[in-house]
Amino acid sequence: MIREAEINRKTKETDIYLKIVIDGRGNSNINTGIGFLDHMLALFSKHGLFELEINARGDLNVGAHHTVEDIGIVLGQAIKDALGDKKSIKRYGTAYVPMDEALAMVSLDLGGRPFLVFEAQFTNDRIGEMETELVEEFFRAVTVNAGLNLHIKVFYGNNNHHIIEATFKAFARALDEATRIDERIEGVMSTKGIL
């Protein structure tokens, strides 16, 4: 069974097509209109070994906020849809990723209870066309729509690009771990019997 999802979402602010294959090889084709976000999503695809295709158009004339948040919404929905009943997945994942002077940790649970803890500080307002504050908004949107409990902590770092890149790579690796099938798990990894 191929674990994949394809979503089209169109609003007055954005028009987004996204396809994800959970069990992939890390190939991507991404065009969001925001160069830095394209870079981060390509890293997410590569380091999580997800196949990821995104084509997004948004009202970038008013800023990147709507586009970044809505891509987070659609990515979260796609992750949830692709995992289906979550049978035999490991459920939890944690990854530490260094990027030069920066170190980020992401720990997550696919248990269906959305909650975001985001501990990262930035010294610049933006990188390219994207405000750094939108990183948290992106992960909040993913969290709520995928049903993730997501903890992000940047221990240290000076370069904002490195901090954000380490965070996206750690998210990818933690999600890859959590979505892996473990044949020893009968049903779902919960004493409740559902996730």
Image: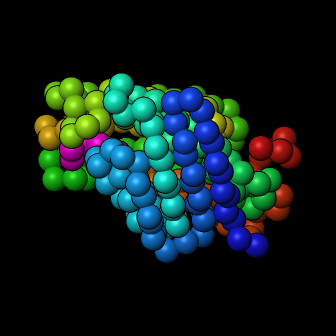
Q: In this image, 131 relative to 141: left or right?
A: left
Asked if the magenta segment contains residue 48, the reply would be no
Q: Determine the image quadrant of residue 128.
A: top left
Picture quadrant where residue 84 is located: bottom right
Magenta stretch contains residue 164: yes
Instruction: Tell me: residue 89, above or below residue 156.
Output: below
Which of the image's four quarters has the N terminus? bottom right
Q: Nearer the viewer, residue 120 or 182?
A: 120
Residue 156 in percent (x, y) is at: 21, 37
- Rendered view: 152 above or below 189: above
Quadrant occupied by the C terminus: top right
Q: Quadrant of residue 104?
A: top left
Q: Is residue 148 visible?
A: no
> On the rendered structure, is 98 left or right of 12?
left
What secondary structure do most residues of the magenta stretch adopt?
Answer: helix
| Observer-nearest of 132 and 14 | 14
What is the span of residues highlighted in magenta in the rendered image? 161-168
Q: Name which residue lies at 33% across and 44% down.
A: 34
Question: Measured from the top left, where is residue 105 in percent x and y?
Answer: 37, 44
Asked if residue 190 can be seen in this view, the reply is yes
